[in-house]
Image (tube, rainbow, N blue to C red):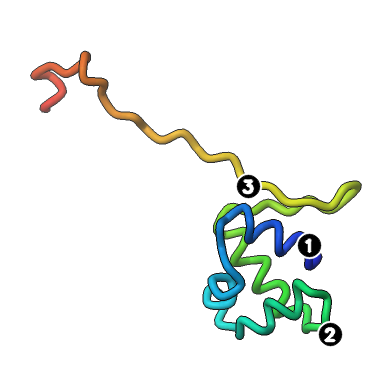
Amino acid sequence: MSPAQSRAARGLLGWSEADLAAKVGLDEQFVRDFESGYGDPPSGQIEALRSALCTAGAVFDDAPNPGVHLAAQATADEGVRLGALTTENDR
């Protein structure tokens, strides 16, 4: 995961740097530094960030064009429509 992909995923999820840091138990400054391209963070910590973002629905694309998008939402069972309610639905 690149710093730009991390920023984009947070944006899609509506998360702040502090939100992401809290999800993985890291300092907010670590997230800020990583996304700004500072230093050489351990790959395990980057993977922890990626894992938290993926769990929330971010999907990372690598080649040929790196990017990120949200996973398609599964359609929920809508139940019985009002017009279809009968005493049979109560059983």
Q: Quadrant of the C terminus?
A: top left
* SS at badge 3: strand
Q: Which mark is residue 4?
A: 1
Residue 8: x and y in percent read 70, 57
Q: Dividing the picture into quarters, in which one does residue 46 lie?
A: bottom right
Label 3: which residue?
A: 70
Q: Dividing the picture into quarters, in which one does residue 86 lie?
A: top left
Q: Check the image and name the residue furthest to the left.
A: 87
Q: Which mark is residue 25?
A: none
Label 2: which residue?
A: 39
| Above or below: residue 77 compared with residue 65 | above
Is disc 2 surrounded by few (<14), some (14 to 19) or many (20+) residues within 10 Å?
A: few
In this rendered view, identify the residue nearer to me: 5 or 42. 5
* SS at badge 2: loop
Residue 70: x and y in percent read 63, 47
Task: Please tell me whether mark 3 or mark 1 is closer to you in this view.
Answer: 1
- Residue type (three-letter) at the residue carrying disc 3: Leu
| Above or below: residue 34 compared with residue 14 | below
Alpha carbon distance from label 3 to label 1:
15 Å
- Residue type (three-letter) at the residue carrying disc 2: Gly
